[in-house]
Amino acid sequence: MNWTSCCKNFCAALLLATALAGCSEEAKPLLQVGEKALPFTLEMLDGKTTSLENYSGKGLVITFMSSWCPCSNESLPLMKQAYTDHKNDPIVFLMVGIQDSRSKFEGFVKKWDVPFPAGYDKGDRIAKDYGVSAPPTTFFIDKNGVVKRAFYGNIAKKPDEFRQWVAEII
Amino acid sequence: MGGGAALWGGFSSFFSIWQVCILQISPFFIAFIVGTYLATPARETDARILRWIVPPCIAFGVGFNLFYSLLIASGLSFSRPLITNLGSLRIVAGTVILLASLHIFLVNRSPFLGKMHRPLPLSGLALLLGISFALIYSPCITPMLSDIMGLASQRATAQEGLVLAGFYGIGITLALCLVAVALTLLLGKNATALRHADAIKNACGVVLLALAIMNLTGLMRHYKAFVLGFVL
């Protein structure tokens, strides 16, 4: 078998694997704005676990971040400010560490003195369910568990929209 | 936003702070192209170099952009299994990168690999490498990519997002290939580098081997966390 045949066979195998994976995952819902958020269980940095049900009846801003990502670092001051502004409102801010080492993510949370709960998504399982391929990605979920908005990237570039989206889910 | 703007956005991101994120793939692709060139029998120092490295660059771009845009377009039902099975697909990608590194290591020692070291078969390998790099790459979300992902993540606008992500990806690969080709042309004219060609070629193989191991063992997240975090 020559090199070209090897490549052709590998491509065929890859496509077949993708197609088969597609069959097995067909039943999985696609997280979309306007639909119910997918349930999750997250291990928090303090060792406790939390899940989506814990936030029913409250708005939830869930943000997927990595310590090494410039946008995640730039987004945090605004996120912290929003948390302070809405401390007494029925809204929860939750940070999820993805595509990162646990120790670096813990250092990141410490460095920024993040005042709201943070957890580490081991194996990026929640990120996969939420269709998150890159940090930072933020979802705005209302008190009924419906995804009202999804934002990809540096939230600090859209401060007014961010405040409006937070207000929408209270 | 049009395709031209998206293409420019991807191209310019390569030469900006966003290179921090592209470091996940850029040194490894350059190692592949340089290693490929240094493994060529004659190591031509004129324009004939291009015959060896341009077709693999184009093939890499095709493979990379196809899967990069599909992974961005999470609103497409076809993309969903790719995203969900990314963990397994990254193992496959690691295996492909391992084969590429072995090729660079062994090409001058194995008559079979030596025979296969031609522009066309190399382009086949580069195509697979492009797909592999798209699978292992976690892009930083630039302001423009943010808008593209906003479109690509929703069913109603996913196709538009897919096309724009494709243009954005072409911009990145265009910049990546230009840098790799320029570096190879410079290397081809440098007598010292050519004197140590075997050592440099093997170093390129080591760089690719490191990437393969990181993807096969799950250490890639540590590369992102420590190396990219250090640069940042």
Image (cartoon, coloured by chain):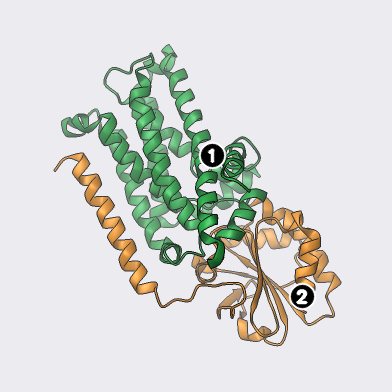
Q: Is residue A115 visible?
A: no
Q: Tell me the chain of label 1.
A: B
Q: Is the residue A143 above or below the residue A129 in the image?
A: below
Q: Colour of chain B?
A: green
The answer to which quarter of the image holds residue B211 is top left
Residue plotted at (72% across, 79% down)? A59
Q: Colour of chain A?
A: orange
Q: Position of residue B98 (x, y in %)?
A: 33, 45
- On screen, residue A115 versus residue B29, left or right, reads right
Mark 1, residue position: B171
Q: Is the residue B146 above or below the residue B112 in the image?
A: below
Residue plotted at (39% across, 35% down)? B58
Residue plotted at (42% across, 53% down)? B215
The answer to which quarter of the image holds residue A108 is bottom right
The amino acid on which the numbered mark 1 sits, given as a three-letter code, is: Gly
Mark 2, residue position: A168
